[in-house]
Structure formats: structure tokens, C-alpha cells
Image: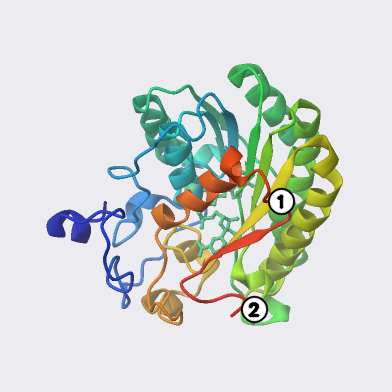
Amino acid sequence: MSEDQSQSGKSQYTMQNPVTQYPQPPFPQQPQGAPGTVHEMQPKPDHGETTYRGSGRLAGRKALITGGDSGIGRAVAIAYAREGADVAINYLPDEEEDAREVIRLIEAAGRKAVALPGDITQEAFCLQLVQDAVAQLGGLDILVNNAGKQTAEKSLDEITTEQFDQTFKTNVYALFWITKAALPHLPPGAAIINSTSVEAYQPSPLLFDYAQTKAAIMAATHSLAKQLAEKGIRVNGVAPGPVWTPLQPTGGQPQEKIEQFGGQTPLGRPGQPAELAPVYVFLASQEASYVTGEVYGVAGGMGRT
Ligand code: NAD
Ligand code: MG
């Protein structure tokens, strides 16, 4: 629960005006180096730590979430654990502090937590990651390809080949390597969920390389859903709008854009990670048995509208 919410006694389960439910711009400029930490964010993001209520929707499931230390991945890890899943999270070694908190929260939900730090731009690590997740969870039936790299640049001149390569390696190649390695382990009923973005539909001039990777993830989701349907494996995506996570103040946006972050959406504010988690829960659960090849928007009114 955010401070605003705890003061008002409201949670995400209380009917209220979504416009004023969470902090609205302006926000302070707050540069930090990538990959960043949730602790330097002002105001603090809400990942559902004190509020998310599970109801057994993922009882006994085994999930691997990339980028599970912070932001959307953290909110999904908390929700999955409270829904009854054992959860492995991947993150960069620099993010150990954020990751430890998530591990504690998963364990506090009474579930097994597995910490698997490492750099997913390396194919060999991606293969090892899946092997370790399968070994330590005792199988795998939910894969959330959520890690991402976003670096805003004003012009094409400023995008180096190295940056272009790193953005594609993190967002596109890793999804390919991890998913390919996971497939032999996924039973019928398993679910793959990919974090794409409204950038796939409405690319920003500042996000030339990132927007392309998110469009690639959308196509990958549609293609793989058709390919894996006969195996009984569902594949869906989530397309967030602006969400209050470390991705943005660590170079994902210029600092002047952080001040008004989310203000361009019809709801007039950024989403909080806690507002994304229920969609990832639904898509992973058996309740979504007839849902595959879809991309769900959670974007405050932006996206395909
Ligand atoms: P975040 O910074 O909290 O999470 C991104 C995570 O990616 C990091 O925590 C890090 O662990 C991981 N990561 C990055 N490079 C990595 C590497 N080389 N190896 C291993 N892990 C690596 O930010 P977030 O916003 O929660 O991002 C999660 C996903 O949501 C991303 O795919 C992002 O593109 C997507 N998304 C975010 C927004 C937004 O506004 N925040 C909007 C649309 C889509
Ligand atoms: Mg992080």
C-alpha cells in the first residue's frame, strides 16, 4: 500500500477513483544508474507488499520470473507466491539488495523462493538459468519473460551499436534463449507471459531501439501461441503503459520527462507495479484456459485506443 493509501485506509480492493488512487505528477527528478533500485524512487512504488491478497489461484505452481527483483516483476513475484506458487527470480548481480527483499516476501507467503542472479544477455547463462530453476523448483510451469532494458536517446546518432545490441540481447534474444530452454520442461497447462509495452503500438521518438524490441516481443507472443497451442501451452503478453519502476529514472526517460511521467495518459498518472500483477496472475492461472496469443494492455487508457 502506498503512504497515501494507508493514510486513507484504502487498498486496491476498495472501490475508489482510479485517477486519485496513486500518486500523480509532478514528480522530482531522480537520476540513478541502471539497473537502479526501488529504494531511491520518490515516491516509493507500490508492489503490493502490504496489500496483495491471494486466493489459491496458482496453488502448487512453479514460476520463473526474469527481472523479479523490482518493478513489475517484483509485484508479480509477490502475487504469484501469495497465490500459492513457488517462485524463482532472475536479476542482475548488482540488484542483490532488491532481490533479497523479494525472496523474503516469497518465503513470508510460505512458498519456496529461488534466487538466480546473472546476465541474460549471455546465452550460456540463460540455459543455466532455466536448468537451475527447474532443478531447484522441481519443475517449471510458468515462465514470465519480464526483464528489460530501456535507454532514451534523442537521435539515431546517439544510439551506439553497443546500445542497440544490448537492448536487443536483453529484450529479444534472452526471451528466445530462455523460452527455448524452458520448453522441454513445460507440461500441458503451462503458461508463458511476456512483458511487452504500449511502445510496440505507439513508439516514442526517444525509444527507437526499445520500441522495436517490444514490437518483436508482441510478434513472438502471437507466433509462439500458435506454435505451442497443440502442446497445451498458452502464450500471452502484457503491454504496460508508463509504470513507476526503476527502469524509467535510470535512463529509460530523460529526467525532465520523469517530472510529468504518466501525465500523458487519460488517467493522468503512472501505473504502479501492483496494478499490473493481477493480469499476470490471471494469464498464468487455469482461469485463462481459453486465452492464448493475446496481449493485455494495462496502460491508463493509452495503447491501441
Ligand atoms: P525494472 O527496472 O524494475 O525491471 C527490469 C529488470 O530487468 C531489472 O530489475 C533487471 O533485473 C532486469 N534486467 C535488465 N537487464 C538485465 C540483464 N542483462 N540480465 C538480467 N536481468 C536484467 O523495470 P520494470 O518497468 O518493472 O520492467 C519490467 C518490464 O516491463 C520490462 O520488460 C519493461 O520493458 C516493461 N515495461 C515497463 C514499463 C514502465 O513504464 N515501467 C512500460 C512498459 C513495459
Ligand atoms: Mg531491478
Tell me the element at label 2: loop
In the picture, measured across the screen, residue 41 lies left or right of residue 96, that is: left
Quarter of the image where one finds residue 150: bottom right
What residue does disc 2 label? 202
* Residue plotted at (41% across, 30% down): 106
Tell me the element at label 1: loop
In the picture, measured across the screen, residue 121 lies left or right of residue 25, that is: right
Check the image and tell me how it is coloured: rainbow
First of labels 2, 1 by sequence position: 2
Checking the image for residue 292, the label placed there is 1
Q: What residue type is labelled 2?
A: Gln
How far across and how far down the image is residue 11, in percent? 25, 53
Q: Is any part of residue 37 visible from this angle?
A: yes
Q: In this view, does 73 lie above or below 59?
A: below
* Residue plotted at (40% across, 33% down): 82
Q: Is any part of residue 122 visible from this angle?
A: no
Tell me how far mark 2 sits from mark 1, CA to CA. Answer: 23 Å
Badge 1: residue crowd in 10 Å (few <14, some 14–19, many ≥20): many
How far across and how far down the image is residue 61, in percent? 57, 28
How far across and how far down the image is residue 159, in percent? 70, 72
> Which mark is in front, 2 or 1?
1
* Residue plotted at (72% across, 63% down): 213
Q: Which amino acid does label 1 sit on?
A: Thr
